[in-house]
Amino acid sequence: MTGSFALLLLCVAGAHAQQASPLRVGTPVRATLAAGDTLRYELNLPKSHFVAGRVDQDGVDATVTITAGGPAGKRVQRAARVGRGGPETFAFATDTAGGRYVIEVTPATAGKGGAVRVQLTRSEPVATTPEGKVDQAAAQLYKDTPGAVVGVIKGGKLVFVKGYGAADLTYGMPFTPETPTNIGSSSKQFTGFALALLASRGKLSLSDPVQKYIPELKDFGGGTPITVRHLLTHTTGYREFINTLIIEGRQVLEGDYIAPDEVIKVINRQPKLQNAVGAEFNYNNSAFALATIVLERVTGRPFSEWMRDEVFLPLGMTRTWVRKNPGQIIPGRSIGYIPGDGGFVEVRDLYGSAGAGGIHTTPGDVAKWMHNFKTGQLGGPAVIKEMTTSFVLNDGKPSNYGYGVFLDSTRGLRRWQHGGNDVAHSSTFVYYPDLDAGFVVFSNYQGVPGGIANVVADAFFGQYMTTPQRATASGGPAVDVPAAVLRRYAGKYEMTTLGGLLLTVELKERQLQLQVPGQPALPLKPTSMTAFEVVGAPAKITFNAAADGTVDGITFEQGGQHPGKRVVEKPTVDLATFAGRYFSEELETFYDLSVEDGKLVIRHRRFGPVPLTYTTTDTFSGTLPVSQIVFKRDAEGKITGFEAGNGRARDIMFTKVSR
């Protein structure tokens, strides 16, 4: 139910004040947001009350900040994601005391203002039923915004399923339970199952060298063959082909074409493996792209056709397809969106995804797939056990990854799970084997509230877990971290096990944000004084804070734990010595480095300029296309070249060819 609580316009800071006007549920109020001004609204609410709303922007990029107790009170939420032309949405719940809450709307860009419409869309008691909790977690999704679908599955049946927001903004198509959606890397479990199924039928052996099926693929020697099993467990040592193509200069995220066999060409140009076979878990799309090719060579059929005939349809998954390329029509599918200057911008799926991340499906079909984990209807129990047993690395440690599925526990409950991200789409897939139950959250916008999955897990399965959920139902912060502490966390961190990938943590208006190269910034939500969830992605960050408050690094959790060291920019060398033109024989591409405004800058004919950040002697970090550069010197100390990387592709050699 909705309440009659009204927001009152308290003041407009600036040259011209506006007379107070009430803001009621369902009735938008138009206002002018002048440069440097603040629109401020107040709401007095009872305890355990839920509020949602939106601020539509007309030519102005607005920031919406919610505080408890007044403008200087504890921040509850900050919205500044969409950009001018789209709606900034908000939702929050009061604590057990209730009281005064203030909503402030300010220009996000200094010196620029415009018209806004402020609307309260929901005002109601905090939900107490699982279904109501999910509805409130998704309250920021509207019919004119990208959306999501949530499905909760028990015993192979949907016990709750609901779509929110739009699947297609151009034609106003709503997101429904029947909307096929790109699930990104959650697709990998289907590919892993398919190869295990073929092995059970005697069509191949998972212990076979990959070259048995792809003889043109380079053999790196070393005595330990790369097997089909290594492909399915991310332990090959191959470069990640999408990341490699980005370093080469391909605009992959802008829709550049990638041929199905391009992964073979990338690996064949690789001079040596990035790590010993079986020694390191390096999440890698190259391996699953090759697994796709292996299946096609063994079966003699296109991957998309074989999967539909041999996996999807036998399980009754009639609304599941492998999308061969971004041009293939999937009837009624969701379109992907990212934020842009005019609001939301439509983007294409990635080329070359196939078995690595090209499956479109629905919650109803996934219910049938999940139940097969329990019954073994297709493949039998042996295949299920094979794909859900952790690979053991060379040092004897488990990787906690099977064939396309992470194997872990959450709050005392065993879990098989995988997340997925395309350029715009994202997915969460969770199965609890001890319950024969789980859930999915599929969306067509990575800015969809990241707390939805946590709310679903707690609302429907919290009773089976041994520790409580820390996040609130509204998705707001569970812990109030002082601003002085947040300032200490802001900075740049070089990820030592991710090829020198540079993560940037920024503090904007009392909100930490994580910037991953080539991706939109995502808010960080505190769960303790040092631990934060990444809102919009299945990831966590823990800051390594010493007793004196100094922070020397982070631990980033996504597909394992990855340490990162803090970057302190103190160049002690002449940056001009690094300037010049560099060429990679492996990638057949050039980079130009120059010094501009006291910074070392890197350029490619299709990228740049991108400033580089000094980390340690002869090592610099940056954003895409290259996140780390390590310069090489000869015996006389002269720069001869550098090794480049951007996470899953690393140690790519560039030779200096001119000053």
Image (cartoon, rainbow, N blue to C red):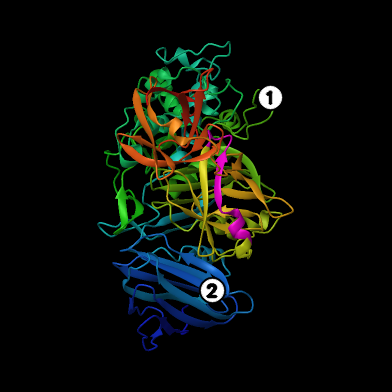
**What amino acid is found at the position of numbered circle 2 in the picture?**
Thr
Q: Using a 10 Å C-alpha cutoff, classify the residue at mark 1 as few (fewer than 14 neighbours), some (14 to 19) or many (20 or more).
A: few
Q: Amino acid at mark 1?
A: Asp
Residue 449: percent from left, percent from top: 47, 58
Secondary structure found at label 2? strand
Task: Say if 211 sits above or below 46 in the image.
Answer: above
**Quarter location, residue 657:** top left
Image position, residue 358 (x, y; %): 39, 37
How many marks on residues? 2
Disc 1 and disc 2: Cα gap in Å? 50 Å
The label on residue 67 is 2
Looking at the rendered structure, which numbered label has been put on residue 10? none
Taking the spot 60% from the left edge, 54% from the top edge, the residue there is: 489
Which residue range is magenta in the image? 485-500
Residue 383 location (% of width, % of height): 56, 29
Q: Secondary structure at mark 1?
A: loop
| 1 or 2: tag closer to the N-terminus | 2
- Please indicate whether residue 121 sits to the left or right of residue 512 in the image: left
**Taking the image as drawn, is residue 84 in sight?**
yes
Which residue is at 45% across, 66% downward? 139
Question: Hey, which residue is sitting farthest bottom in the picture?
Answer: 19
Q: Say which residue label 1 marks.
A: 395
